[in-house]
Amino acid sequence: MTVWAQQLVQATAGYPNYRIRVIDWSLTADAVDFAIFDDAVAFLALTTGTTQQLIGFRITDQAFVQGAIGHFEQLWLTGRELD
């Protein structure tokens, strides 16, 4: 994944506001994936069971979206920026 992220850094070098950070994930469980669309909608994706089946939820609850934004900011600060 790091190699792919480094390739993405090179491919987006001409976009000054495009930044990539990598978080070293040492757990054997998958992380929770989510996308945040402005400040009104979040999408939460989870793998389930041993089959790695993916399920997702669109969430419009303002408190959840604000919590997701705070969680993303924490993750962003712990990540390392690639050169």
Image (cartoon, helix red, strand yellow):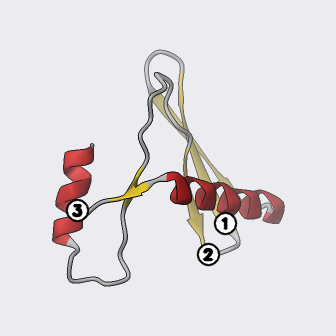
Q: Residues within 10 Å of mark 1 (few under 14, many from 20)?
A: some
Q: Where is residue 22 in the image (x, y as percent from the top left)?
A: 38, 51
Q: How crowded is mark 3: few (under 14 residues within 10 Å), some or many (20 or more)?
A: some
Secondary element at image label 3: helix
The mark total stands at 3
Q: Where is residue 46 in the image (x, y as percent from the top left)?
A: 56, 36
Secondary element at image label 1: strand
Residue assigned mark 1 = 41
User: Gap between marks 3 and 2, in whole Å?
Assistant: 23 Å
Q: In this view, does 69 lie to the left or right of 29?
A: right
Residue assigned mark 3 = 8
Query: Which residue is at a point 21% across and 50% down the rendered structure image?
Result: 4
Q: Position of residue 14 (x, y in %)?
A: 21, 83
For this rendering, which residue is in front, 35 or 20? Answer: 20
User: Gap between marks 2 and 1, in whole Å?
Assistant: 7 Å
Taking 30 as reference, is 64 above or below it? below
Q: In this view, does 7 lie to the left or right of 37?
A: left
Assess whether mark 1 and mark 2 are in contact (beta carbons under 8 angstroms).
yes
Query: Which residue is at a point 75% across and 57% down the rendered structure image?
Result: 67
Instruction: Farthest residue to the right: give it.
Output: 63
Q: Nearer the viewer, mark 3 or mark 1?
A: 3
Amino acid tagged 2: Asp
Amino acid tagged 1: Val
Q: Residues within 10 Å of mark 2 (few under 14, many from 20)?
A: few
For this rendering, which residue is in front, 83 or 18? Answer: 83
- Badge 3 or badge 1: first in the primary sequence: 3
- Badge 3 or badge 2: first in the primary sequence: 3
For this rendering, which residue is in front, 51 or 34? Answer: 34
